[in-house]
Image: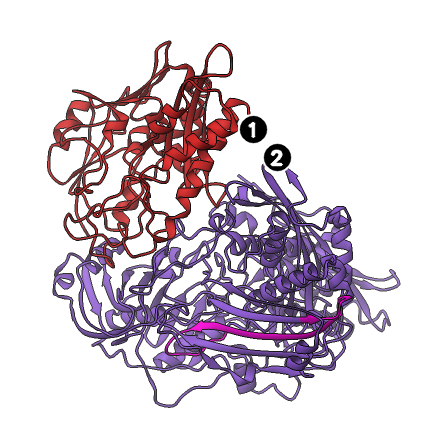
Amino acid sequence: MTIIEPRKHGSAADGRVGGRLSRFEGELKITGNATYALEYPVENVAHAVLVQSTIAAGRVVSVDASKALAAPGVLLVLTPEDDLGLMTAADWFGNRPENQPFHPLPKVVRYNGESIVAVIAESREQAGEAAKLIRITYEEAPAVADMDDPKASEGKLLDAMTVEWGDAEKALAASPVRIEAEYRTPREYHVAMEPHGLTAGWDGEQLTVWEPSQWTHGMARNYAEWFGIPLDNVRIVSPFIGGGFGSKGVALPYGAVAVAAAKKLGRPVRLAVTRPQNFTSYGGRAATRQTISLGASKDGVLLAIVHRGASETSVYMDYPEQTGAATPILYKVENFSSQSRVVPVNAVTPGALRGPGKNPSAYGIESAIEELAYKLAMDPLELRLKNYADHDYQSGKPWSTRRLREALTEGAEAFGWARRSHEPRSMRDGKSLIGWGIGCGTFPVIRAPSSAMIRVLKNGRVEVVSGAIDMGQGTYTILAQTAAEALGVSIEQVDVVLGDSRLPGSAIAGGSMLAGSITGAVHKTANAAREEIIGLALNDPNSPFRDTGANTLVVSEGRISVASGDGPSMTLPELLSVLGRDELEVTRNTLPDDAQSASDRMNAWTSMGRVQGPTMGDTSMHSWCAHFVEVRVDEDFGTVRVSRMVSAFDCGRLYNPKMVESQWRGGIIMGIGQALLEEGLVDPRNARTINNNVGDYLVPTNSDIPDIQVISVGVPDYEASALGGKGVGEVGIVGVAPAIANAVFHATGKRVRDLPITLEKLM
Amino acid sequence: MRDFSYTRATTIEDARQAALQAGSAILAGGTTLLDLAKCGVNEPDELIDISHIRGLDGISVGESEASIGALAKMSAVADHPLILKVYPAVAQSLSLAASQQLRNMATIGGNLLQRTRCPYFRDPATFSACNKREPGSGCSALGGVTRNHAVLGTSESCIATYPGDLAVALVAFDAVVDLGSRSVPVEEFFLEPGDRPERETVIAPGEVIIGISIPASAAARNSTYLKVRDRQSYEFAAASVAVGLELEADGRIVKDVRIALGGVATKPWRARAVEQALVGKALTEEVILSAARLSMEGAVAHGGNHYKIELAPRVVARALRTLGGLA
């Protein structure tokens, strides 16, 4: 049964860039026909199950695997005693330490839930049951459970993250109006619907890994370097991903374990990370705390911002969750100071989770600005507009485009902000206290080169091919639109092939950079293909266009013709036929002309080496948004429900508004969860995250989510990307939590400065 | 792989015989058992599937009582027109529990027997101490993260919360569990942990829940189930209450009132002190508030769950106001 017509669209315009084409792979997904990594039918596959530590710190003294090895179906047990012969792989930036072994099953335990042993058996059930028979003897060491542990340090100051201009301390001291407050966010987790895992198999020295990946080429490099094999020998297959949110960018230690087991056994191995293990097999968003001091004049001119932030990191790596990331760029201020620390705790190294840095940062500054508004007895919208940043005060550069003013004013209009009464607890409906709040969000435009291939086939199909991925954000769909428009073919003719490291390399689907990068590459490739087709048609001795005397030809709706309308006209397959060709294949990339060597390309597709930040050029480039939230708080119970939301965005040009709106709403929904529900609960005695399942780690359900009106106020920004768009994937979550916290304050008069806003904080 | 035998019982007598064996477990909807098997808490040697026994899924609502078969699905009871009309709190307790998918699978008998969500109970690999799992091993929850733990009916051995909703409504309306050879009031069916938290009900080896019956009453007919939680749906209660109210003919004085609490106690908790404080009185704000406070008599907080002592009386008061027309 066909539930959704493939390529369904209202008019021909929907098939072009900017059209509201439905998701290409939507039908496959909702009918269960999209094959995910753990579903690939691989013959003779063995199954691996991880055994993780139950202590927070210490040393593995011994592993007794005798009972497990004797259990039915068990093929192999890997322990810290096994030297897997792996070497440390390069970091994000391509830097690789020399001769440094990598032990994915370590002898030294650094956090509760660290993978220590893997059991591989004929079936997953056999492996799981045998895993319960593993006995690990530890020598425990003192641990720091979290940043509130009395044993936790104040943290390491990261000089590279210090931002200063003017004299913030002095200006703050001299400010007639001041506020200072500490804001805190807990550990938060990706909880993608598809848990992590992989299926891996060797064919001689060739390795194939079916694994959900936000970056097939980068992940291939991880495996190649771990196992000391050429990059070309590794193939990552990832056509569908059940959500990543930052967690599936690089290969992780469990992947090394599965691949090593497959090598030892000489047969494919499948490893499914269980839902509880997903809470410690890679890091979520770090817990943060930040103190923000604002100084202002009595009429609401912001004079100084002083920010002091800290976030948790692990005891073996510094990963800063940059609570100062949004602080410097949201408002006009002449005096600014921000410092950040990392506090080592016994937890897995935190990672990037949708809107890293900008997210907790916006929670701080957007809460603080409303606290200032109330201190000034000023409307929070008016205060924001009064201190509107006319340029980027941090870099000193002009904005490329910044329509945050329009987002604030058009959002306010759509929401009905003018009808708000300023006083807290001044709006109610029976026992429901009603509150309205604003939170602004931002996310930098990050650019990276990408490559793509286009094949025009004799059967009338056009293939767009790239190693880029689609984890639900709409890559398949917008690339078809981009190619159809640039090449001059109908959207129905276009097929898109993605998610395989054997295909042309691309930017990571992270940092909201993929859409802008890969549409640029496909646009360039499609234009080149059209030019090549026209060139062949004009010059080939067998072409009927050769004698028309035309300087150029047009390609439209899949037909090539003379611009005047006179003369021959034929479909692209007909042209290929008369030219005697089976197909036409064109590959292009967006690397600079002087960086086209093989090593340049490898570096570009497998590291952050070619990534450009928001102020690398003459301007400062960011996406922007303003969220308007209505909450209803039960006066007696303290329960908060978001009852209405309007969010206005400046993300430049939208390649497909339907996909973009879905991304924005998805981010907003995660923001609602962050504000009201999500929190990793750590047992202080053994540093274990005890709510490590989706029954106890709560994310929003459908009934927690109101109608969300989203508005685009952006204009094309051709500095940001070839087609004028800015990133859409992450900005949506940024600013939601403070908007809700601000609305809760307006409803109740209570300012909650630590997320999530659970009922006992309002009772 | 852990091997277990699977038997499909065709009669209740089959099931009883099979359930006499140590290490056996009854399988009905499977929503609790499979979950507990996955986290290593429940590892039966023999599964006795009773879901194919005929005639155990009936729902009948008569003049004097309602009878519900043990195999009736939660969703079927929640949507039953006469249950909705005659026992609204019962229907609501079901429709506010779990998710639609789970309600379509889970049975009434199994629902009564669902086990606590205490995270220490559910993680045997990490927390070896749990008196409920391993008698005498200790309680890992004491001194741990306790936001969702009980404040009523706790002991030094166990502070785990009874998680269900339906049983709370049943306790309020004096429902009875039919075990075949005997019938036990739901209130007595559940046990406080005391020094034997591994015993959660009076059910004996070889006993199988056949069904439940709920006496009809004016209070049940005018009843409500109020469940308070951070998430709008699919979350266990921070505090919940089943309340049924019958007023005298004057429409002012409380003739009969039934109140039971969920989410705050180690078993479905009948709040008799509150009921006694209300009977014979006119429902006013003052009467409601002072009576509701009695619901937390004897409550003990363990760290993060202290808010429940404040929250539960407010939930009781809100439900009383709603039923008494004061809202």
> Nearest the camera: A450 or B261?
B261
> Percent position (x, y) of residue A164?
64, 83
> Percent position (x, y) of residue A167?
67, 83
Q: Quadrant of residue A621?
A: bottom right
Q: Which residue is mark 1?
A: B327
In the rendered structure, which segment of residues is drawn in magenta? A295-320
> Nearest the camera: A104 or A357?
A357
Q: Quadrant of residue A648?
A: bottom right
> Nearest the camera: B195 or A15?
B195
Mark 2 neighbour density, 10 Å: few (under 14) some (14–19) many (20 or more): few
Image mark 2: chain? A
Residue A308 colored in magenta in the image: yes
The chain coloured purple in the image:
A
Residue A125 colored in magenta in the image: no
> Nearest the camera: A195 or A149?
A149
The chain coloured red in the image:
B
State the SS at label 1.
Answer: loop
Image vertical order of residue A511 relative to residue A665, above or below: below
Are the residues at dot 1 and dot 2 in contact (C-beta closer than 8 Å)? Answer: yes
Specify the amino acid type for callout 1: Ala
The answer as to whether the residues below labels 1 and 2 share one chain is: no
